[in-house]
């Protein structure tokens, strides 16, 4: 799915807003350069509870931006094979907010 996403913020937000009942989002993608726009777009998908973003070249700051767009109902998060270090205090605090996260 991520391979089909527009690379720009406004188009990305509109696309995610068009599927508010999206519950699962999975993919491998290295082409998204604006993870803040992706995270902001996720605000339009309150029922999203499964997020699988492997091989996306994510860094800690990218994951923080993504998680700020996720509902606290998020219960599965797969982010292996990225550049994550989990060293940002803001990332650790945000992850702690997801009480159903596996």
Image: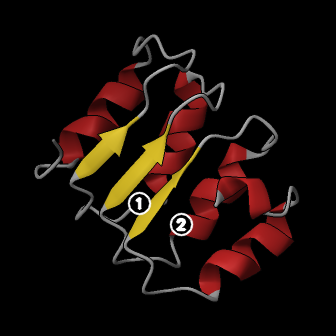
Quadrant in the picture for residue 72: bottom left
- The residue that appears at 37% across and 20% down in the rendered structure is 89
Q: Position of residue 99 (x, y in %)?
A: 11, 49
- The residue that appears at 47% across and 76% down in the rendered structure is 45
Q: Position of residue 30 (x, y in %)?
A: 75, 34
- The residue that appears at 70% across and 40% down in the rendered structure is 29
Quarter of the image that includes the N terminus = bottom right
How many numbered badges does the structure rendering display? Answer: 2
Above-or-below relation of 52 to 42: above
Give the labeled residue for mark 1. 70
Give the class, few, some or many, for how many residues have Cα within 10 Å of label 2's Cα (few <14, many ≥20).
many
Q: Position of residue 31 (x, y in %)?
A: 82, 40
Q: Are marks 1 and 2 in contact (CB under 8 Å)?
A: yes
Q: Residue furthest right?
A: 8
Give the labeled residue for mark 2. 42
- Secondary structure, mark 2, is helix
Q: Position of residue 10 (x, y in %)?
A: 83, 71
Left or right: where 75 falls relative to 77:
left
Quarter of the image that includes the C terminus = top left
Above-or-below relation of 77 to 16: above
- Secondary structure, mark 1, is loop
- The residue that appears at 39% across and 29% down in the rendered structure is 91
Q: Nearer the viewer, residue 93 or 25?
A: 25
Q: Nearer the viewer, residue 68 or 51?
A: 51
Q: CA distance from mark 1 to mark 2?
A: 6 Å
């Amino acid at each position: 799915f991520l391979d089909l996403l527009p690379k720009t913020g406004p188009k990305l937000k509109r696309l995610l807003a068009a599927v508010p009942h999206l519950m699962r989002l999975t993919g491998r993608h290295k082409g998204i350069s604006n993870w803040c726009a992706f995270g902001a777009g996720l605000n339009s998908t309150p029922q999203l509870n499964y997020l699988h973003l492997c091989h996306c070249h994510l860094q800690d700051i990218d994951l923080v931006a993504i998680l700020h767009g996720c509902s606290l109902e998020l219960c599965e998060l797969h982010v292996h094979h990225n550049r994550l270090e989990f060293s940002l205090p803001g990332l650790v605090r945000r992850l702690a907010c997801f009480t159903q996260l596996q």
